[in-house]
Amino acid sequence: MTEKRNHNAEHYFASTPKSEAKFGMVHTRLRGEDFKFLTASSVFSKKQVDLGTRLLIEAMQLPDAGDVLDVGCGYGAVGIAAATSNPQLHVVMTDVNMRAVQLARKNLKINKLSNAEVRCGYLYEPIKDSTFNCVLSNPPVSAGMETVKAIITHAPRVMAEEATFQMVIRSKIGAKTLPSVLTETFGDCMVLARKSGYRVFLAKKVDLR
Ligand SMILES: C[S@@+](CC[C@H](N)C(=O)[O-])C[C@H]1O[C@@H](n2cnc3c(N)ncnc32)[C@H](O)[C@@H]1O
């Protein structure tokens, strides 16, 4: 997370932000495509696409077809870039912050996507009866490492066999902790990309029977 917040600002992970929404528009290029994102106060990285988000988007390995989950989608950059990269995918984006969910829904329309949807709720609760071929996460580190760990350890329940889990984190925060949590959960993990003080980790769900 690179964004500075003033002392009285709400956390970006408040479920129903109370502050008046001040809107902005981010124009950016990701994976060779142009995007416009409507953003607002009390939502993560409202002035620009965060460096960690950008690294995850540029590095992410997407399946040829199937279902992709962007857990903690914010205004939707990761899920929208995934849905644009491959129209064969169906992308589900979730967030606990209702304002983020509303923005992500608007951003699907602004970017003319019909192969993605947005659901509101805590971690995997909104998609608990589904399985995915790929789970993508730029986790809410400000909410605490327990939340980050829960995103990792609960992911296999919503993953198909051979599905990948891909998470970006600031190296200073996650370089030591994440490999052990990922390895305990999935048996192994690798660093997919490393840049600007961030790392993208990838782990695969394998059938250990
Ligand atoms: C670091 S931000 C990343 C947002 C977006 N993926 C991006 O990269 O721009 C983490 C997101 O997780 C959401 N979040 C925090 N706690 C959550 C929870 N328990 N369940 C679901 N989403 C959560 C926050 O509201 C925030 O939008």
Image: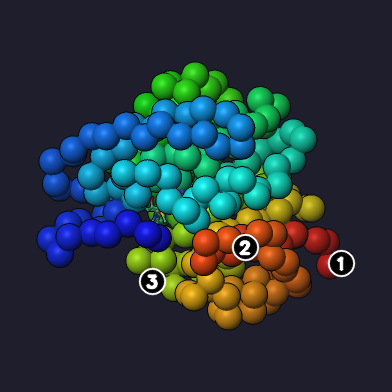
* Spot occupied by residue 24 in the image (x, y as percentages of width and height): 27, 34
Q: Mark 2 to mark 1: distance in Å?
A: 33 Å
Q: Quadrant of the C terminus?
A: bottom right
Asked whether residue 86 is in view, the answer is: yes
Residue drawn at (32%, 57%) of the image? 3
For label 2, the crowd category at 10 Å Cα-Cα, with few meaning under 14, some 14 to 19 and many 20 or more, is some
Residue drawn at (58%, 80%) of the image? 176
Q: Earlier in the sequence, mark 2 or mark 1?
A: 2
* Residue behind mark 3: 144
Amino acid at circle 3? Gly
Residue drawn at (20%, 56%) of the image? 10
* Spot occupied by residue 120 in the image (x, y as percentages of width and height): 39, 42
Q: Mark 3 to mark 2: distance in Å?
A: 22 Å
* Spot occupied by residue 141 in the image (x, y as percentages of width and height): 41, 66
Disc nearest the viewer among 2 and 1: 2
What is the quadrant of residue 189 in the picture?
A: bottom right
Q: Mark 3 to mark 1: distance in Å?
A: 33 Å
Secondary structure at badge 1 equals loop
In the image, taking residue 8 as reference, residue 63 lies left or right, namely: right
Amino acid at circle 1? Arg
Q: Nearer the viewer, residue 82 or 165?
A: 82
Does the residue tagged 1 have its C-beta within 8 Å of any atom of ligand 1?
Answer: no
Secondary structure at badge 2 equals strand
Asked whether residue 154 is in view, the answer is: no
Q: Which mark is residue 194?
A: 2
Q: Nearer the viewer, residue 57 or 153?
A: 57
Does the residue tagged 2 have its C-beta within 8 Å of any atom of ligand 1?
Answer: no
Q: Which mark is residue 209?
A: 1
Disc nearest the viewer among 3 and 2: 2
Disc nearest the viewer among 3 and 1: 3
In the image, taking residue 98 as reference, residue 30 lies left or right, namely: right
Amino acid at circle 2? Arg
